[in-house]
Amino acid sequence: MSAAIIDGKKIAADIRGELAVQVSELKKRGIVPGLGVILVGDDPASKSYVTAKEQACHDIGIFSDDNRLPSSTTQEQLMTLVRKMNADPRIHGILVQLPLPKHLNESEVLLAIDPDKDVDGFHPTNVGRMVIGEKAFLPCTPHGVVQMLARSGVVMEGAHVVIVGRSNIVGKPLANMLMAKGRNANATVTVCHTRTKDIGSFTRQADIVIAAAGRPNTVTADMIRDGAVVIDVGVNRVEDASRKQGFRLVGDVDFEACKSKASMITPVPGGVGPMTITMLLFNTVESARRFAHLPE
Ligand code: GUN
């Protein structure tokens, strides 16, 4: 079998098209959705993510308030900026790009963001609401994975999903979202991680394998069953002298080998990546609608 490629760029473009329509309708009512963006320091990967997020906002008509701060920024300066954005009516969503430089207290910053503007879904209030099945901003990467599966016709209800990785940004929220009661959920979920004995013995039982470990070749062909759906959340830079930038991006999955065994698979790049940014736009538009008391 050669797997169907799940085209994240295409699905992302479809959703962005739907969001652009919503943004223009909001603008007719005098509402411009706004995203406050904070990047501290000069980590190259973070810089390129933030630039892509702001470009995506621009493309669909979302206002973005760009704040690039030096790595010498103090905790108090950062907290002051977050509080200013909390109070700014032009801003419906706040994005603090992670990771922050080591001297800054990340959890204190995330806690300072107004949960009603927490479009990353990282505030403990939104995390808690998601876990108990209440309305919440869902974190962008796992939300994007669920949308990708749903829009590719993959049935999650009753499926055995094995997630490799237990991060706060992907593995843990994804497990909660997929095991929840409701649409695009109701799955049986297993979470594997670095201390799991024989990860393959779990992934081989999966209808859907989701790799979110942050390490190339974490999922190899011998670890999946014939016909499994394979989602690769990994974005790893590996040195490649033949590329202008000196590196190329690879996922966590041995794509070439798994492609001939899986029924559907996501590539890297062009898979989950474009969905993450798209769901940030989705949450920002949703937030603007909520602030305007419009139906979602
Ligand atoms: N760093 C890596 N992924 C993310 C994300 O989704 N949001 C933020 N704020 N930082 C990140």
Image (cartoon, helix red, strand yellow):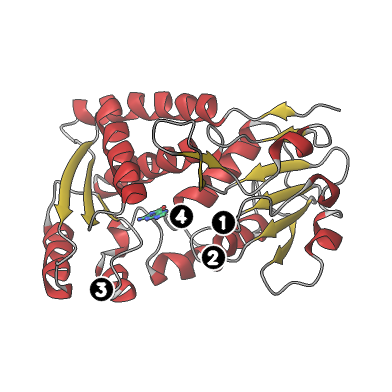
Residue 220: image x %, image y %?
77, 48
Looking at the rendered structure, the kind of residue marked 4 is Pro
Which residue is more in the foreground, 4 or 119?
4
Distance between the Cα atoms at labels 3 and 4? 22 Å
**How would you rate the neighbour count of disc 1 (Cα within 10 Å): few for under 14, some for 14-19, many for 20 or more?**
some
The residue mark sitting in front, 3 or 2, is 3
Looking at the rendered structure, the kind of residue marked 3 is Leu
User: Residue beneath label 2, please?
Assistant: 167
**How would you rate the neighbour count of disc 3 (Cα within 10 Å): few for under 14, some for 14-19, many for 20 or more?**
some
User: Residue beneath label 4, please?
Assistant: 139
Observer able to see residue 72: yes
For marks 3 and 4 on the same chain, the one whose residue lies earlier in the sequence: 3
**Cβ atoms under marks 4 and 2 closer than 8 Å:** no
Residue 255: image x %, image y %?
70, 38
Q: Tag 2's secondary structure?
A: loop
Which quadrant of the view contains residue 34?
top left
User: Residue beneath label 1, please?
Assistant: 214
The residue mark sitting in front, 4 or 1, is 1
The residue mark sitting in front, 4 or 2, is 2
User: Residue beneath label 3, please?
Assistant: 104
